[in-house]
Image (cartoon, rainbow, N blue to C red):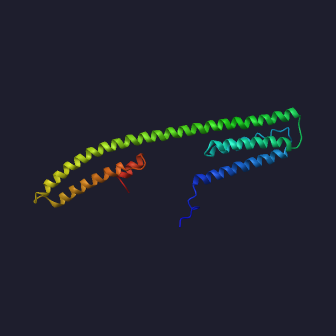
Amino acid sequence: MINRYKYFDDNELFTIKISLISVLLAIAVFIIDLQIPLGVAGGVPYIIVILVSLWLPKPRFVIILAIICSLLTLLGFYLSPPGGELWKVISNRSLALLAIWVTTILALKWKCYKEEASLLEHKIEKEKEKIYLATIHGAQHITNNLLNELKLVELEIENHPKFDKEVLSMFGNMLTEANTLMKNLSTVDKIDDKSIRQSIYPK
């Protein structure tokens, strides 16, 4: 019986780890914010949480953490020790919220750019694969025609009993190897220099 927990996705595990780190950082910043007077911009370090969330796979995680950090910033306004003039306190909290959301917007823009770059790279790889397969199919067609003609030559050689049997065997092996190499080239899993070379010259 297959253990379903054994094959836990590595990406999901990474996402969980980064999420936990982000939440713990937010809690740590909140605790520090509660220890310092209101006159200090204690909400600004929440930017670190947003930056850490860049490693999370989906943009919604960044937005969720930004909302959490904003709520903690506002909660800190009510729970932190009194200190400083009210207008300065409000200004500091407002600047902290502004910093959090500016960082969030930039983070989302960066993730969007990264996703577009990834899609473009995938598209280029697909186009490269199409060109490679078209080239291989063309070469395979030409090679197959040549191999069929050489098969006729092989049959003619076999009809001459005086022809060296060892040379005939070598000739047959060459035809078989050429056919095998063309099949290997046409079934390469990954289109890159290393994979192509390994398909022709396997270890």
Closer to the camera in the image, 194 or 128: 128
* Residue at far front of view: 1
Q: Residue 2: x, y in percent?
A: 53, 65
Q: Residue 121: x, y in percent?
A: 49, 40
Which residue is depicted at the point 54% across and 37% down? 116
Q: Is residue 81 left or right of residue 202?
A: right
Q: Residue 169: x, y in percent?
A: 20, 59
Question: Can residue 16 be spotted in the picture?
Answer: yes
Q: Quadrant of the C terminus?
A: bottom left
Question: Can residue 45 be spotted in the picture?
Answer: no
Which residue is depicted at the point 18% across and 60% down? 166
Q: Is residue 129 left or right of residue 9?
A: left
What number of labels is visible? 0
The answer to which quarter of the image holds residue 65 is: top right
Which residue is depicted at the point 69% across and 37% down? 103
Q: Residue 31: x, y in percent?
A: 80, 48
Q: Is residue 137 left or right of residue 9?
A: left
